[in-house]
Amino acid sequence: MLHTTSPLQVAVILTALVATPLAAQAPPDQPDLLLASIQQGARHVRSVFMTAAEQMSEEDYAFKPTPEVRSFGQLLAHVAGTNYWFCATATGEKAPVSDVEKTITTRAAIQKTLAESFDYCDRAYAAMADDAKANALKQFMGKPLPALAVLNFRTYHSLLHWGNAITYMRLRGKIPPST
């Protein structure tokens, strides 16, 4: 038996197909869950680095596990510098600070710059609440990526260095804040 589809049935099927992706989106009064989870990761990175920065002494900032690697202070300054770079890339701005690792050397100056770099990134993450900004393609490592993906990569990068910081802290007899 041949079955025909009525125009009403076609309309119902098309409506269901269009409505399904819309239903999966967060309601306008609720935050975007993907953005919220990426922001939560960024807050964690800020928390552990800023706490570690406070726990280590000026002497600890000069500590290098081996002569070939960065000192603890240089490691934190590197994170600050890359915060500026990643977040400026995501927002399409020119990084307001550069050469942090080479120019900022004291404990107090590194802590201040690190905090300011996280503040700068907080503004970049907040800008991602605008879908157009979050999805705007940015040239990153030779390929176009959405701005929010650049910020997410920043978190990965920071956490790689967090692993270094944990080792430095343990070698200096400190307990890392994420433990």
Image: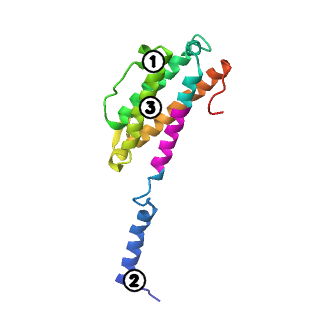
- Amino acid type at circle 1 is Ala
What residue do we see at 48% from left, 14% from top?
A: 106
User: What segment is highlighted magenta in the picture?
Assistant: 34-47
User: Mark 1 or 2 closer to N-term?
Assistant: 2
The image shows residue 49 at horizontal and vertical percentages of 54, 29
The image shows residue 158 at horizontal and vertical percentages of 51, 31
Viewer-proximal residue among 56 and 121: 56
What residue do we see at 34% from left, 37% from top?
A: 91
- What is the C-alpha distance between the residues marked 3 and 2? 58 Å
Q: Is residue 5 left or right of residue 61?
A: left
Q: Which numbered dot is residue 118?
A: 3
| Mark 1, residue position | 109
For disc 2, the neighbor class at 10 Å (few under 14, some 14 to 19, many from 20) is: few
- Amino acid type at circle 3 is Phe
The image shows residue 62 at horizontal and vertical percentages of 56, 12
- Residues at discs 1 and 3 in contact (Cβ within 8 Å): no
| Mark 2, residue position | 5
User: Mark 1 or 3 closer to N-term?
Assistant: 1
Query: Quarter of the image containing the C terminus?
Result: top right
